[in-house]
Amino acid sequence: MNDVNLNRVDLHLIIVLAGFGLLVPLIWSGYEIKLATTIAVQAGLAVALGFVAGAGGLISLGHAAFYGLAAYVFALTAPQLAPADLLATALLSIGGAAIFALLVGIVSLRARGLYFLLMTLAFGQLGYHFFHDTGAGGSADGTYIYFRPELRLLGITVSFEQPYRFYLLVYFAVAGCAALVWWLRRSAFGSVLIATRDNETRVRAFGFSPYVVRLVAFVISGAMAGAAGYLTAAQNGFVVPEMLGWHASAIALVMVLIGGKDTVSGPIIGAAVLLIAEDVLQRLTQHWLVGIGLMIIAIVMGAPQGLVPLMARMFFAGTAADSRWQWWRHG
Amino acid sequence: MSPFFFFVQLLNAVQYGLILYLVASGLTLLLGIMNVINLAHGAFYMVGAYIAFAIVEHIASFWLALPVGLLVGLALGALMERYLLSRLEGADHLSQVLLSFGLILLANEGQRILFGNDPHAVAVPRLLDFSIPLSDTLAYPAYRLFVCLVGVAFVVAIRYVMARTRIGMMLRAGAENRDMARALGVDVGRLYLGVTAIGIACAVLAGVLAAPIASVYPGMGDQILILSFVVVVLGGMGSLDGALVAALLLGLLDSFGKQFFPSYAAFVVYVAMIAVLVVRPQGLLRSTA
């Protein structure tokens, strides 16, 4: 499997997904729109995590902390009796998540590999217990948000109470995140980040600080996770401490791996596969988690690089051997 | 706080710490020797607890649960290594996280299918169903004392195996330098099989032992899993002695912290974990990394 083919499949998948995403509100309504919104939001979280896990090689088991913290910031700053201002509260929530990611990153990025994973796990649990044990934000029961935020810009007010409008808001937010990650991975910064993953010593020899590069990537990722958390809180109308716990972080990692961490479309497809499988299995049986568990194990064992690299390999099967004769296939 | 009450709390701390050590020792061996992160370790603890519940409730006495738990644990561990972990060798920690998360989902849902959502109490074995009076008002349950004794016996046994036997030597060599151990002729595949089987049997046995004290309930493995990770980190990955000290410390924190600062007990645990990871990533006991 070479990178050229993988990149090409990735780009095609993103275009298809983006086009399909725009068609969703035209084809469906009601329940399907809600499901599509959930998928899109979770895809945003997965894209954020996939960026640091894939390009940075930083396996974080605490990303839900940024997601959940942003949700709580929104829940605690939104007015009780009127819709909140979208831009103001979103900036506040995402900023809060970014600052927390900066603090976690400053400490955790001193460690590598398993130590980093366990450090982020500890920070995530710290966040969970902060909201669960101390009474902040309604303790174990969480807090309600009674209105979705509305966009107030240039004297125009746009409400997002209608599902399809909220879906479009989420769609553009997540598309923005995915585009940002796509661009970052191909930027000079992204090249250095990928290089810190592959050979830290050389990066240092070139005069970069791997620590700073990783920290910047981690904060960007944390901010995007925060955006997903903000939108989740706005969609559901409530926040609970479990949004920060390690189960939520592990599920985000599951999405990233199902699709493939080395692509941008991978985490999106991972989120879609997981949530659609959940939805279908839930109709069939109350013990749907068995199916999800088996699916995860099958994918880890059968396609450890994820579904998108698997698709790329199937699509380009056989071309590697006789690629000399198929020069037109290479861009 | 009266001296007797203090003594009771101290015994509780030791008993809880030893259960935690039983779970964490397997986790630390897997991490230290095989570099495997097993999120499903808590799920195996739950399996043990439900084995105790099923046997006491439906089949026979509690004493049968101990050998059954041991065998089931060894079998599950060997199967997991043979068919899942060994095929992931060379893959990154992400795959291990996901594999073990998939196993957690299977275990949790399997538990729900077989036993439902309600918590259940497990009867203390009749032989030990009495209390030892300490003062006019305080008594200590004999079963908890029995758990302490089993824990101490386990500590002695594992220290003996690690320090004095050939297997222990190979384990220490594997934890120190895996490639060198392999180069010196240690059959690493068999070693891994043994470590996984024993490590998971320890978690299952801990669940069996804890069942009459803690009762059994869905998702009971989650709490102990995260605390075991804290123990592993505080003790230093792969260090059994470090894990013992850390487990007893967490036991003390659990019984006294919940008395004096209930809202912040969990906080102290995770702040300690982060602090150790930053300042002494090799663990509390070891002098060098």
Image: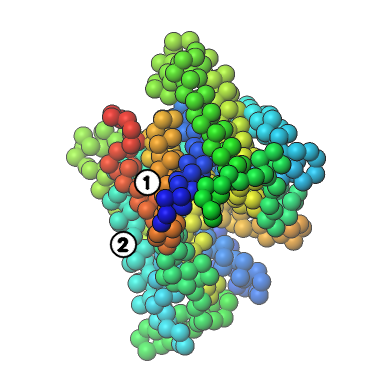
Q: Quadrant of the N terminus of chain B?
A: bottom left
The residue sitting at the top extreme is B185
Give whichever of B197, B37 is nearer the camera: B197
Please name which of the two marks, 2 or 1, marks the residue nearer to the observer: 1
Give whichever of B176, A97 is nearer the camera: B176
Compared with residue B57, is residue A284 higher up or lower down, i.e. above or below? Answer: below
Q: Residue at x 40, y 39 (%)?
A: B246
The residue sitting at the left extreme is A207
Lateral position of residue A28 relative to residue A146, left or right: right
- Here the colouring is rainbow
Callout 1 crowding tier (Cα within 10 Å): few <14, some 14–19, many ≥20: many
Question: Could you tell me how far apart the alpha carbons at marks 2 and 1 are, in whole angstroms?
Answer: 21 Å
In percent of width and height, residue A52 lies at 39, 49
What amino acid type is highlighted by mark number 1?
A: Met
In percent of width and height, residue A46 lies at 49, 55
Q: Residue at x 61, y 46 (%)?
A: B131
Residue under circle 1? B273
Element class at badge 1: helix
Numbered tag placed on residue A99 in the rendering = 2
Numbered tag placed on residue B186 in the rendering = none
Instruction: Report whether residue A284 is seen.
Output: yes
Compared with residue B72, is residue A291 higher up or lower down, i.e. above or below? Answer: below
* Chain for numbered disc 2: A
Q: Quadrant of the C terminus of chain B?
A: top left
Instruction: Report whether residue A280 is seen.
Output: no
What amino acid type is highlighted by mark number 2?
A: Ile
Q: Quadrant of residue A63?
A: bottom left
In percent of width and height, residue B99 lies at 58, 40
* Chain for numbered disc 1: B
In percent of width and height, residue B228 lies at 48, 42
Give whichever of A224, B9 is nearer the camera: B9
